[in-house]
Image (cartoon, rainbow, N blue to C red):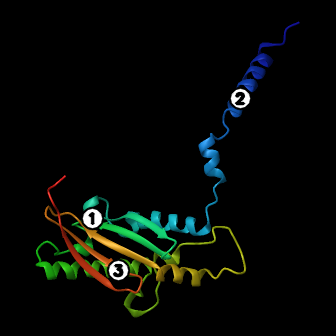
């Protein structure tokens, strides 16, 4: 006596699904990544990078209007978080940049850098509270402990963050402003070379 065709098909489908799920285990490389712990700090830095890259936070719909983060890193030895941003020529903070002399361009870029520092929460806005992106992101993400003062840690993160703002849309020069962890700004112009 043979089983009905329906039961045979169900058994065949079950065997196929079981064999496919047996092959669905992570590869050695992915298994190694799964066993590597990510700290709450790592997750926070990733959230900061993603949030800093969104047009809702720093710019318009196209590259000329945007301020984009190009790098975010943490150096254990210096205990500093370093962020690098590139700003487009049509970004609202760059109005009048191209029509100015070098001192005027310095003023525009410094004003843009100060706005970024306030938006990130590195400096108080209008001399009031320091509230920005760093202060609005969450550190806990479901993790709880009595010993974690999230506001204090966010202030320390803000105190240990440096950034560089780069304007590289001209053929002959790259303009930069660097803000260090003390809040001091440094302006520089690098001449582009045509050597490759």
Which residue is denoted by mark 2 in the rendering? 17
Q: Are marks 2 and 3 in contact (CB under 8 Å)?
A: no
Asked if residue 152 lies left or right of residue 62, the reply is right
Alpha carbon separation for disc pair 3 and 1: 22 Å
Which residue is denoted by mark 1 in the rendering? 65
Say if 81 sits above or below 49 in the image.
below
Q: Earlier in the sequence, mark 3 or mark 1?
A: 1
Q: Quadrant of residue 167 in the image?
A: bottom left
Asked if residue 47 lies left or right of residue 109, the reply is right
Residue at the far right: name it.
1
Question: Who's the residue at 15% across and 60% down the image?
Answer: 193
Q: Earlier in the sequence, mark 2 or mark 3?
A: 2
Q: Position of residue 82 (x, y in %)?
A: 42, 71
**Quick one: quadrant of the N terminus?**
top right
Which residue is denoted by mark 3 in the rendering? 179
Q: Position of residue 194 (x, y in %)?
A: 14, 56
Question: Who's the residue at 20% across and 74% down the image?
Answer: 95
- Secondary structure found at label 2: helix
């Amino acid at each position: 006596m043979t089983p009905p065709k329906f039961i045979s098909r169900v058994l065949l489908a079950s065997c196929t699904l079981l064999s496919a799920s047996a092959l669905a285990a992570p590869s050695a490389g992915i298994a190694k990544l799964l066993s590597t712990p990510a700290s709450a700090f790592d997750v926070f830095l990733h959230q900061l990078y993603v949030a800093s890259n969104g047009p809702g936070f720093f710019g318009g719909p196209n590259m000329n209007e945007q301020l984009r983060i190009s790098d975010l890193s943490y150096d254990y030895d210096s205990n500093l978080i370093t962020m690098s941003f590139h700003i487009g020529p049509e970004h609202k903070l760059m109005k009048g940049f191209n029509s100015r002399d070098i001192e005027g361009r310095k003023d525009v870029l410094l004003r843009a850098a100060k706005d970024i520092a306030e938006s990130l929460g590195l400096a108080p806005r209008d001399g009031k509270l320091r509230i920005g992106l760093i202060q609005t992101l969450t550190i806990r993400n479901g993790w709880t402990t009595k010993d974690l003062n999230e506001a204090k840690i966010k202030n320390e993160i803000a105190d240990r963050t440096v950034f560089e703002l780069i304007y590289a849309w001209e053929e002959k020069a790259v303009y930069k402003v660097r803000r260090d962890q003390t809040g001091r700004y440094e302006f520089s112009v690098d001449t582009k070379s045509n050597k490759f």
